[in-house]
Image (cartoon, helix red, strand yellow):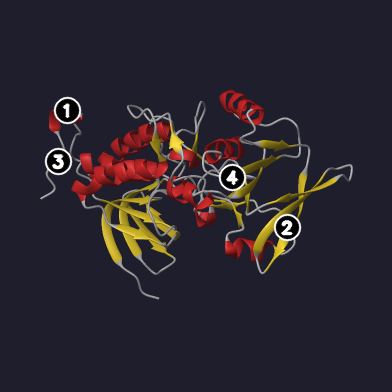
Amino acid sequence: MTGETITTDVAIIGAGPTGLFAAFECGMLKLNSILIDALTDIGGQCTALYPEKPIYDIPALPAVEGARLIENLAEQIEPFNVPRLLGRRVETLTGYRGAFTLGTSKGDTIHARAVIIAAGAGAFGPNRPPLENLEAFEATGGVQYYVRRRADFADKTLVIAGGGDSALDWALSLREVASKIYLVHRRDKFRAAPESLRQLEEAVTAGEIEKITPYQLKSLKGEGGILTGVELATLDGDARTLDADHLLAFFGLATDLGPVAQWGMDQIRSTIPVTPSTCETSLPGVFAIGDVATYPGKLKLILQGFSEAAMATHAIYPIVNPEQALHFEYSTSKGVPDTK
């Protein structure tokens, strides 16, 4: 298998929001960069998991849907013509600070002076419930783990299973379009933000959501992969069957750093420790930002990932330009660098 051979200043592994902003920061410092991602689209979890879900803690944007945030970030890097290698993951990393070589699953070879790992939590997938014939119902969309378009569930009867923020957030959001929503959890207590819990109780009282506790998923009903119902059971053996067009199961994500875990960097529970002031890992010249990075006081927020992107790229500048001092300037003073 033969892919592309590319030489650049910075290889950015991960094209989610922090990776995209790292590309912007590279461009502002006149550093060439490339984005590499295992997904076929940019945006990471914002695109794959919650494109229509509003995000409320991005500065200056009171609310922005995940897909729109990614569109804005992509527009922001347009002046820098950043190449993208999508639908492949980085398998190998060799070399040293100032001279790395990366190899991808499609045979690409990237030569880079520095590397930024912005891979979120790594490769991710849903924790799937252990139900018979699950794959048949997944294939038809009867069972789903993400909500990409709310309109897909218009006038449908939904069983939403889970006790965390995702289950509550989507139950509250989809009540506006679905004809009926059952919220199923194995315990009476939910693990979610206080405001979400307050809104849930209001929705239950208003008859917009029916809360079913303490029940667990037992089996799926239907033929040919077409879901017609979900059977529930308690630990005491009580059973109940709900009519359903779709089961939305929110039991968290299974994550895996994949080949990154074999590159010789220190790791703590599938995260990579970094120096807080530079975001450099234990492997000189390799930096980690966003959810994959950890240090004392770390908050897993997109806005913190943006800050880490700026710190990492400024720390990379002297690697690429060892004999040229970086004179810090505000963007209001220097504008967007001319890339022509």
Give the image quarter of residue 183: top right
Q: Give how far apart the Cα atoms at labels 1 and 4 are.
A: 50 Å
Q: Secondary structure at mark 1?
A: helix
User: The disc labelled 3 sits on which kind of residue?
Assistant: Pro
Mark 4 or mark 3, whichever is nearer to me: 4
Q: What residue does disc 3 label?
A: 337
Residue drawn at x 48%, y 39% is: 291
Give the image quarter of residue 284: top left
| Relative to 314, residue 205 above or below | above
Q: What residue does disc 4 label?
A: 179
Q: Give how far apart the Cα atoms at labels 4 and 2 are.
A: 20 Å
In this rendered view, identify the residue nearer to me: 317 or 69: 69
Residue drawn at x 67%, y 42% is: 182
Q: Give how far apart the Cα atoms at labels 4 and 3 are.
A: 52 Å
Q: Do tag 4 and tag 3 residues touch (Cβ < 8 Å)?
A: no
Residue 24 percent across, percent down from the top left:
27, 42
User: The disc labelled 1 sits on which kind of residue?
Assistant: Thr
Tag 1: Cα neighbours inside 10 Å, few (<14), some, or many (≥20)?
few
Q: Give how far apart the Cα atoms at labels 1 and 3 are.
A: 12 Å
Q: Give how far apart the Cα atoms at labels 2 and 1 are.
A: 58 Å
